[in-house]
Amino acid sequence: MDTDVLIVGAGPTGLTLANELLVAGVSAVLVDKLARRSELSKAGGVQSRTQEAFDQRGLLEPLLATGNYPAGTAHFAGIPLPLTRGRHRLPWRSIPQVAIEGFLERHLAARGSRVRRDHELTDLVQDADGVTATFADGARIRCRYLVAADGAHSTVRSLLRAEFPGRPGTATTVAADVRLGGDEVPTHTWSPDGHWVHVFPLGTDPQGRPLRRLAMGGPGRSLPRDVPVTADEIRDGLRSVLGSRVELLELRYARRITNAARQVARYRHGRVFLAGDAAHVHLPIGAQGMNTGIQDALNLGWKLGAAVRGWAPEGLLDTYHGERHPVGASVLRNVQAQSLLMDSEGTRTPDVAAARELFAGMTRLRDVQYHLDDMLSGMGIRYPMPGGEDEPLVGLPASDPGLGPVPLHELLRSGRGVLLDPADGFAKVADLWSDRVDRVSRVGGTRALLVRPDGYVCWAGGPDGPEAALGHWFGAPK
Ligand SMILES: Cc1cc2nc3c(=O)[nH]c(=O)nc-3n(C[C@H](O)[C@H](O)[C@H](O)COP(=O)(O)OP(=O)(O)OC[C@H]3O[C@@H](n4cnc5c(N)ncnc54)[C@H](O)[C@@H]3O)c2cc1C
């Protein structure tokens, strides 16, 4: 073997996975076909859960120190959710994808793990022991596991002939990074004739001037993807919705995006795993694509680490599909619902307007905002786990507020499991897994919990103790 794990694609998914494997102490090679990292602007919003994931590895503070990234609240279909403010330890934040990728790449390089660029995977063959990947220049890499983090047009997905059901794109909208002058405008505005614009903060330019992510669409605005977006087109779009209240000062970058929505049927194909956009594509509404990819990597990383290091219990690698496929499917559904409520295709049907009015009314209720925030913050993601039927915490992220004074995010930095043992009752049993799980005793204000390396609770007290859960998630005792 040349390496334990080969990661194809150094976007946010691949970079996060490389770091997770580094933390797990297994060798990984990360390749990308591009000679240089893309500076194109893509995602801009980072969910609470993604920030928790970075914080668990000690990466959040240094990432936030690289720029000015304002906190905000998520929205659903452009309907703001202000009642969710202050709900999570780490609020939704606007951090450009390029800043995240640059930070992760530098972080990895400082630890001797450099992205191998100019490496375009063109073929792969897997057998019982491993996978052989071939690159455009004829070079080969042999690995135990291969992860496709090669984006929406994944070569690996095509080579596997992986089933990729869903619906093709039927319309395009414009996404642009701009500087605007004039009045502050609401996040989402329509004109009566079905045109709409969507405006989000996107940090500042090097001169400290505010940048905005602008999305726009409406009748007659769905052009083929290869038609360049012009400044005049954007001016026209702004004018048709906002009149002269807002003016375009600078167009920095623009592209057309489609509303295709697809998800691979299986996230695992033998020794090959699909993650991020390689596994799911959808309209970038509500800042979910990059976040879902990063969280795929968080879920897969420690499991691959366990498999390579030889302690993975039976079936652990399969839980990657079992846990992450439903999350991806739910993201696709909520994006489709948002796209409909936003009338992204500019149908102007009164039915859509009526549904939106009704929905906007409901979202004034705190519980509705909380329900939507559970999805959009990533903090409500609950994995199916044994014991979850009886214990509401099992399967959920172990968020700090529920844990009193215990700084769990710091305890997880080792990339190992954590057993919180406030009554100091599990020393003997925990000792059997002490090479994989850290026990923390005599912590006040919390309950007994077993937390996986990705920060999810997998046991939360109970008369039988944590032994069965330790065996289930961390394999045979030493
Ligand atoms: C306009 C826009 C706005 C968006 N806004 C948001 C947002 O606010 N929030 C959010 O969460 N998401 C957003 N997204 C989505 C987000 O950008 C993607 O979900 C994210 O980039 C996916 O990350 P990834 O690492 O899975 O794939 P990518 O970022 O696409 O990375 C894939 C990498 O694989 C490499 N690669 C491809 N093929 C090969 C090969 N054969 N061999 C080697 N390397 C290969 C590519 O060069 C690339 O570097 C937005 C997207 C767009 C287009």
Image: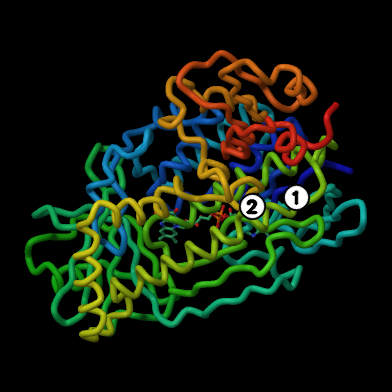
Residue 193 image-quadrant placement: bottom left
Where residue 97 appears, as percent x and y from the top left, is 45, 47
Q: Is residue 11 left or right of residue 474?
A: left
Q: In which quarter of the image is the C terminus?
A: top right
Q: How far apart are marks 1 and 2 (CA)?
A: 21 Å
**Residue 147 versus residue 66: which sits nearer the camera?**
147
Query: Is residue 114 found left or right of 40 in the rendered image?
Result: right
- Label 2 neighbour load within 10 Å: few <14, some 14-19, many 20+: many
Residue type indicated by callout 1: Leu
Residue 9, which numbered label?
2
Q: Does the residue labelled 2 lie within 8 Å of ligand 1?
A: yes
Identify the residue under disc 1: 317
Name the residue: 55% across, 47% down: 295
What kind of colouring is applied to the model shown? rainbow
For marks 1 and 2 on the same chain, the one whose residue lies earlier in the sequence? 2
Residue 46: x %, y % from top left:
41, 45
Which residue is pictured at 44% across the width and 20% down the height? Answer: 405
